[in-house]
Amino acid sequence: MSGLNGILDVARRALSAQRAGIDVTSHNVANASTPGYTRQRLNLQATSPTKETFGYLGSGVAASGVQRIRQAFIDQQIRNTNHYLSKSAEQESVLSQIEAAFNEPSDAGLGSMINGFFNSFQDLSLHPEDSSFRNSLVQRATAMNDGFHRITASFDQLKSDLILDAQSKVDQVNTLVREIYETGQRITSLEAGGLDANDIRDIQDLKIDELSKLANIKVSDDGQGGTLITLGNVFMESRAGFSTLQVGVVGTQLQITVAGSSTVADIAGGELGGILETRNVLIPGYQAKLDSLVSSIITRTNAVHSAGYGIGTPPPTGNNFFVGIDGRSINVNPAIVSNLNLIAASGDGAPGNNTVALSLAGVSDEKLLNGGSETIPQNYSSLVSDIGATIQSVSNASKSQDLVLKQLENQRSAISGVSIDEEMVALIKFQNGFDAAAKVITTVNQMYQSLLNMV
């Protein structure tokens, strides 16, 4: 449409477009501090020109939509980093509790108790008939056993606590997946009606980010504007529906399966991945090493002790010093606790003989563990060092991933975050555009007045 009416129509479109730009800009400013908010941009395009006798004449501008400024690649990188960081942080937290249970290095640690036990046999060898040294030996053995019991109980308690922790995390996963699905349904409904769902998509993305901290999810586009979320080998959410998880213990292993089925979720990352690896692999591994150490102490001590003689007529022999087989069950033989004369120090039953006491003191120097390459104290030190090295490894991984995450978040903020300065510039631009369009209308009005005056 040409003529003054056409110019008015162009100005009207310009006013509408610039006003929409101010609306979008004010929305950005209002949500500058809103968690998960993505900066929005008004897309403008020239409307179709009209054909005149002298050629084509532009018909103005129109808003073609409001776009979220977001990069899917950075979102995926952040979510990948989230599950690595959360796994390391979860493991570091649990392993620190294990380290505290061992309380090493310390005079009150288990290592000192083990050394004290074998040193008591050395003391007994100097006074093989003295009941006070026999009593001291039993007390130190009991203290060592209590140390083994305490650490074993700590392992058991941690494994029980991790089941509860896993259940809590799975509940969070199920809640987030359901909310992501419901949000997706709202997005579909709004966009099917031609409405803008940018703010709802922000809510959905924020929930997906939270979900990525709990497990190693993979998020993709279903090709129709919806999300498709998988967790290892398990489908979790799409437009068609969603799955939920459940926690169970099979044998000694903690497992997370799809609710209502036997399908085990392949969870290798996130807080749940850290819980599963710590409970199913790391803690049983440390417990097995500790039990192997305890078993060696029991077996070798009993073998040497049962061949010796205590005090009496005839001198008692054939008595084991320990009962039990591992860190949970090791105890001093109750018969010895009630009768200290059953403690064997002599090798032939003769009064004052100390050969067995010396042999028992020397057990700590025998290479009984790790294929005959480690003594009992060395094996214990190796176990403690292994725990410390693992903590250091996950701590370094956690710090590294945290640094990567901060860099990625800064990149996303630079792209998707709201800059007040930039929005103020945009606001001035749209305001000037609005004023200019209004000026066009004023000019056309004056032109109309001129024409009317001519009449």
Image (cartoon, rainbow, N blue to C red):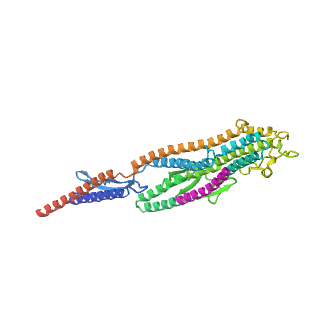
Q: Is residue 200 left or right of residue 438?
A: right
The part of the chain drawn in magenta is 150-177
**Residue at the extreme right of the image, as rendered:** 314
Q: Is residue 92 left or right of residue 295?
A: left
Q: Is residue 120 left or right of residue 187?
A: right
Kindly give the residue lying farthest to the top in the view shown: 373
Q: Residue at x 63, y 60 (%)?
A: 260
158 on left or right of 312:
left
Image quarter (top left, top right, bottom left or bottom right) of the C terminus: bottom left
Say which of 125 and 292 sits in front.
Answer: 125
Q: Quadrant of residue 303 in the image?
A: top right
Residue 390 placement (x, y as % from top left): 59, 43
Q: How many marks?
A: 0
Question: Could you tell me what secondary structure mostly forms the magenta stretch?
Answer: helix
Residue at 61% x, 54% y is 162
Q: Is residue 455 visible?
A: no
Q: Position of residue 48 (x, y in %)?
A: 31, 54
* Residue 161 inside the magenta-drawn segment: yes
Q: Is residue 329 visible?
A: yes
> Which residue is more in the foreground, 415 or 82?
82
Q: Which corner quadrant of the image does residue 261 belong to?
A: bottom right
Q: Position of residue 180 (x, y in %)?
A: 50, 58
Q: Position of residue 40 (x, y in %)?
A: 37, 54
Q: Quadrant of the N terminus?
A: bottom left
384 in the magenta segment: no
Q: Residue at x 23, y 55 (%)?
A: 436
| Viewer-side residue, 212 vs 407 | 407
Q: Residue at x 75, y 47 (%)?
A: 132
